Image (spheres, grey):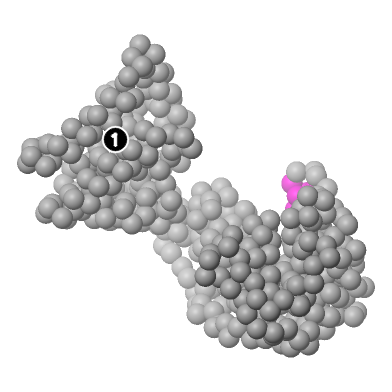
C-alpha cells in the first residue's frame, strides 16, 4: 500500500532510499557493508514475521504529571523582573563606557559565557563591527599578520616550557576559536593542534584550580559544541569563584538565569497538561513517554524568553513523533502500519475506522495538533499552512515506513538503508 504513495516524493529522494531494482536481498545469506565498517556483517536466515509484536522495554517517565505541575519558582514575580531590568541597564552602561578594545572583547566574552549577551545584541554588534573594520584595515597593510598570530602562540609554548610567563587564557581562547574553522583553513587546524597540546601539558603542571577547570571542560567539550543554557549554568559557578569577578555581572547573570528557569517551568507545565489530555503516555505503555526530554531539547535549541511558543510547539511535535516512531519500530504489525500510513496520506478522520484503537489515538492526536498549528498560524499571521503541514507529516511517516519495509523485506540490508533514511530525515 505504501509504494503508490512514494510517487509523490521527488525522484532523487526515492532513488536514494529505495533498493536497486531486480535485487532479491532475502536470498542472500551474508553481506558486508564496507561503507560503514569492515566489521559490520549480517549472517543467518532470519526473516521477521509480519505479525510479530516486539518490545523495547522502555522505562516509564521518571517525571510524573503531579510533580511537573508542582514546580514553582519565586522568580516569576514582578519584583525580580524589575530588579533584573535595573541590573541590565547597569551592565549596558558598563559595556558602552568601555573603550579599550581588548577589554571590550573580554567583557563580551564573559557576557556570552554567562548567557546574558542576548540582552545586548545591538551594542555587541556595533563594538564587533568597529573592531573588525579596524583590523581589516590593518590586515590589508600587512599580509603576514594572520600567520604571525600562530608564530606568537608558538612562542608562548616555548615560554611555558622555559618556565616563563605565558598567556594561558589567550591560548584557551585560540583553542575555542579554532572550532569555528571552515574547510581548507590550515592555520586554524594548526592552531588547534598547537593549543590543545599546550593546554594538556599545562593541566599536568598547573595548580590554579579555576583555570584548570576551564581548560579540562574545554578539552572535553568545546564551547562551540555545547548547549548555551548548560554552558551558562556551568560558567556562572566558575565566574563566581574568580577573584576579579564583577559583582554586578554575576548578580545579573544569576537573576536572569533564575527568571528564565521560571519561564521554562511554566512552558513545561503547559505542555504536560496537553500531554495528559492526549492520554498517549498513560495508554501506550510500549512507547517512550519522553515529554520532559523533548522539552529540554527545545530549550537547548532556543532558550530566549520570546520563543516560548516555539518551545511548546516543538515539544508537542517531537513527543508525538517519538510515540509514532515506536509504533512503527516496536509495536505495530506490518499490516497495521500500512493501514496507518495510508490513513495519514488520506488525512481523513474516516480513515481511522480500519485502525486499531492505539493507532486511532495516535492519528487523532496528530490530526488535532496539525489543525491547532494551522489555526494559530492563520489567526496570527494570516497564512493557510494546512496543506504544507499535511505534506510534511506524510513525508515523515512514509520515511519511517520505508525503514520498516526494509526490516521485513530487505532484512540483510536493513542497517545500510536505515542509515541512509536517517540521513534523509
| Relative side of 85 to 295, left or right | left
Q: Residue at x 63, y 63 (%)?
A: 419
Residue 45 lies, in percent from the top left, at 69, 84
| Relative side of 10 to 58, left or right | right
Q: Quadrant of residue 189?
A: top left
Determine which residue is flagged by label 1: 106
Hey, which residue is sitting farthest left in the picture? 163
Residue 227 lies, in percent from the top left, at 44, 54
Q: Residue at x 39, y 34 (%)?
A: 186
Residue 379 is inside the magenta segment: yes
Q: Residue at x 69, y 61 (%)?
A: 421
**Quadrant showing the C terminus:** bottom right
Residue 206 lies, in percent from the top left, at 13, 52
Hey, which residue is sitting farthest top in the picture? 141
Q: Which residues are magenta?
A: 376-380
Residue 6 is inside the magenta segment: no
Residue 86 lies, in percent from the top left, at 37, 41
The correct choice, above or below, for 185 with respect to 192 in the image is above
Amino acid at each position: 500500500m505504501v509504494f503508490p504513495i512514494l510517487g509523490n516524493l521527488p525522484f532523487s529522494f526515492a532513488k536514494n532510499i529505495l533498493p536497486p531494482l531486480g535485487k532479491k536481498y532475502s536470498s542472500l545469506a551474508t553481506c558486508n557493508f564496507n561503507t560503514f565498517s569492515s566489521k559490520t556483517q549480517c549472517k543467518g536466515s532470519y526473516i521477521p514475521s509480519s505479525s510479530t509484536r516486539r518490545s523495547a522495554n522502555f522505562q516509564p517517565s521518571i517525571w510524573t504529571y503531579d510533580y511537573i505541575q508542582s514546580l514553582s519558582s519565586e522568580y516569576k514575580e514582578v519584583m525580580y523582573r524589575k530588579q533584573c531590568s535595573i541590573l541590565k541597564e547597569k551592565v549596558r552602561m558598563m559595556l558602552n563606557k568601555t573603550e579599550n578594545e581588548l577589554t571590550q572583547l573580554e567583557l563580551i566574552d564573559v557576557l556570552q559565557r554567562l548567557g546574558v549577551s542576548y540582552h545586548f545584541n545591538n551594542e555587541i554588534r556595533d563594538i564587533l563591527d568597529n573592531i573588525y573594520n579596524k583590523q581589516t584595515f590593518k590586515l590589508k597593510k600587512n599580509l603576514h599578520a594572520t600567520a604571525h598570530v600562530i608564530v606568537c602562540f608558538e612562542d608562548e609554548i616555548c615560554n611555558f616550557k622555559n618556565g616563563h610567563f605565558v598567556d594561558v587564557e589567550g591560548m584557551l581562547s585560540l583553542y575555542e576559536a579554532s572550532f569555528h574553522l571552515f574547510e581548507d583553513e590550515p592555520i586554524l587546524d594548526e592552531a588547534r593542534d598547537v593549543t590543545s597540546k599546550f593546554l594538556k601539558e599545562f593541566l599536568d603542571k598547573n595548580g590554579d584550580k579555576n583555570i584548570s577547570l576551564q581548560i579540562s571542560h574545554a578539552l572535553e567539550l568545546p564551547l562551540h559544541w555545547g548547549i548555551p543554557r548548560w554552558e551558562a549554568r556551568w560558567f556562572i559557578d566558575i565566574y563566581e569563584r574568580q577573584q576579579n569577578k564583577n559583582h554586578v555581572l554575576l548578580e545579573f547573570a544569576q537573576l536572569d538565569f533564575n527568571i528564565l528557569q521560571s519561564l521554562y517551568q511554566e512552558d513545561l507545565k503547559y505542555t504536560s497538561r496537553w500531554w495528559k489530555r492526549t492520554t498517549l503516555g498513560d495508554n501506550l505503555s510500549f512507547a517512550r513517554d519522553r515529554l520532559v526530554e523533548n522539552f529540554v531539547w527545545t530549550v537547548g535549541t532556543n532558550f530566549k524568553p520570546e520563543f516560548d511558543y516555539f518551545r511548546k510547539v516543538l515539544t508537542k511535535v517531537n513527543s508525538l513523533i517519538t510515540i509514532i516512531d515506536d509504533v512503527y519500530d516496536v509495536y505495530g504489525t506490518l499490516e497495521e502500519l500500512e493501514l496507518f500510513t495510508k490513513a495519514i496520506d488520506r488525512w481523513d478522520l474516516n480513515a481511522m475506522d480500519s485502525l486499531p484503537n492505539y493507532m486511532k489515538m495516535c492519528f487523532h492526536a496528530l490530526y488535532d495538533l496539525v489543525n491547532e498549528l494551522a489555526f494559530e498560524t492563520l489567526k496570527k499571521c494570516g497564512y493557510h499552512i494546512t496543506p504544507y503541514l499535511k505534506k510534511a507529516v506524510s513525508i515523515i511517516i512514509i520515511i519511517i515506513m520505508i525503514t520498516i519495509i526494509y526490516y521485513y523485506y530487505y532484512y540483510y540490508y536493513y542497517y545500510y538503508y536505515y542509515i541512509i533514511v536517517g540521513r534523509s530525515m
